[in-house]
């Protein structure tokens, strides 16, 4: 498998974007992957002003003691049905159950429970970059017995 295909597997970026990143970094694989992630986060920030009229409610219950209801919004119902969007909703609900953030602004600043080198805000921006739509956490509530 060549470097372009490996970068595509890791980043889900297009072939031309992978080739361009490799050219821009002088063929350095790790730098090319980092550059694609950086460009994706920049694109995600540009999308942040777009309205989010679709989305889903996701529920998660942990050991019948902690429950989370999460409202995750996106621009279209097409993305709301996407497995990557649904996986993000599930991962965020699990994170909320484990870390008990006080509100959305607290949540997006937290380090991700599955990988503390990733901040929740950047986790969401990564999915925005891959799906091409604005995504945001609208509301959540957490219950514990």
Image (tube, rainbow, N blue to C red):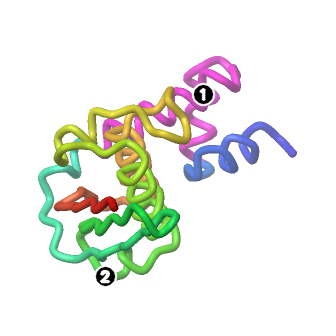
Is 10 within the magenta? no
Report the Cα–Cα distance between label 2 and label 1.
32 Å
Q: Residue 8 location in percent, x, y?
A: 66, 48
Q: Is residue 100 positioned above or below 23 on the image?
A: below
| Labels 2, 1: front one | 2
Residue under circle 1? 32
* Magenta-colored span: 16-44
Q: Is residue 58 positioned above or below 22 on the image?
A: below
Residue under circle 2? 77
Quarter containing the C terminus: bottom left
Residue lying farthest to the right in this orientation: 1
Q: Which of disc 1 and disc 2 is earlier in sequence? A: 1
Residue in the picture at 39% in, 61% down: 66
Q: Is residue 138 positioned above or below 119 on the image?
A: below
Q: Quadrant of residue 121?
A: top left
Q: Residue 133 location in percent, x, y?
A: 30, 61
């Amino acid at each position: 498998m060549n470097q372009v295909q490996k970068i595509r597997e890791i980043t889900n970026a297009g072939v031309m974007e992978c080739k361009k990143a490799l050219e821009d970094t002088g063929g350095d694989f790790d730098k090319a992957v980092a550059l694609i992630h950086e460009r994706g986060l920049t694109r995600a920030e540009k999308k942040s002003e777009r309205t989010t009229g679709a989305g889903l409610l996701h529920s998660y219950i942990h050991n019948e003691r902690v429950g989370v209801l999460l409202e995750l919004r996106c621009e279209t119902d097409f993305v709301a049905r996407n497995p990557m969007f649904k996986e993000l909703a599930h991962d965020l609900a699990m994170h909320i159950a484990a870390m008990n953030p006080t509100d959305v602004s607290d949540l997006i600043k937290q380090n991700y429970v599955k990988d503390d080198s990733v901040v929740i805000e950047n986790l969401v921006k990564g999915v925005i970059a891959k799906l091409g739509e604005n995504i945001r956490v609208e509301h959540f509530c957490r219950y514990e017995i």
